[in-house]
């Protein structure tokens, strides 16, 4: 099993320049997670590339402990647009 | 991943315009995320080849390495990896999926 803080820390480290992050346990079983992440590192990257960066940051956690991870990734610009 | 598995995956992707590597089948999806993509494709009116990774452990592991993407489902259109459940649902909601599905050979 993994804790929200573990995921958050790994993502902050692996992705870098994270200005906003919310990690949520969707089912209370600590294996179905949702993460909303805003980072300068995502600027100019496709959705696939952004998600691959997050998966790379989580590494082996994605091969078992984390069964599902719903991702919402934004660059600061697209996040402000989203926020309106 | 050994070459034969890589070739087998490549063969599946090359011989179908739209391929969904999923858990279960298009008629009996066995995972919420796979079922979501099946539903999105149905609404988009797009036929597709389903590949049930639950029946093929080699493909289930190999496809993750193939796309450098650790989860299932995975959608491929005309040989190109388009995304997993989040991305496909977002593209559908933004009306971007139809363009990808119907785009002719580039």
Image (cartoon, coloured by chain):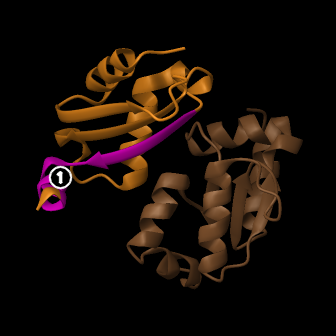
List x then y, in percent, for residue A59. 49, 23
Q: In the image shown, does B20 or A8 lie closer to the viewer?
A: A8
The residue lying at 14 percent from left, 61 percent from top is A81
Q: Is residue A37 left or right of residue A84?
A: right
A81 and B30: which one is in front? Answer: B30
- Residue at 67% from the left image edge and 65% from the top image edge: B38
Residue beneath disc 1: A79
Please determine whether, in this image, residue B26 is positioned above or below residue B65: below
Q: Which residues are magenta?
A: A68-82
The colour one sees for chain A in the rendered image is orange
| Nearer to the camera, B63 or A62 | A62
Q: Residue at x 42, y 78 (%)?
A: B95
Specify whether residue A64 is painted magenta: no
The picture places residue A13, in percent across and down from the top left corner, at 28, 20
Quadrant where the N terminus of chain A sits is top right
Label 1, secondary structure: give it: helix
- Residue B73 visible from this viewpoint: no
């Amino acid at each position: 099993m993994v804790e929200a803080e573990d995921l958050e820390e790994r993502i902050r480290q692996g992705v870098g320049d994270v200005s906003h992050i919310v990690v949520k346990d969707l089912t209370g079983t600590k294996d179905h997670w949702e993460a909303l992440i805003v980072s300068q590192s995502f600027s100019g990257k496709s959705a696939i590339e952004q998600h691959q960066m997050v998966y790379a940051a989580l590494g082996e956690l994605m091969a078992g402990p984390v069964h599902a991870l719903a991702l919402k990734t934004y660059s600061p610009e697209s996040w402000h647009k989203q926020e309106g | 991943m050994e070459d034969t598995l890589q070739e087998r995956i490549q063969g599946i992707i090359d011989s179908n315009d739209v391929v969904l590597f999923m858990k279960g089948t298009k008629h009996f999806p066995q995972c919420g995320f796979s079922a979501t993509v099946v539903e999105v494709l149905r609404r988009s009116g797009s036929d597709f080849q389903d590949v049930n990774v639950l029946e093929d452990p080699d493909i289930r592991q190999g496809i993750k390495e193939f796309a450098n993407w650790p989860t299932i489902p995975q959608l491929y259109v005309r040989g190109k990896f388009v995304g997993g459940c989040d991305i496909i649902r977002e593209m559908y909601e933004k009306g971007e999926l139809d363009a990808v599905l119907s785009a002719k050979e580039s």
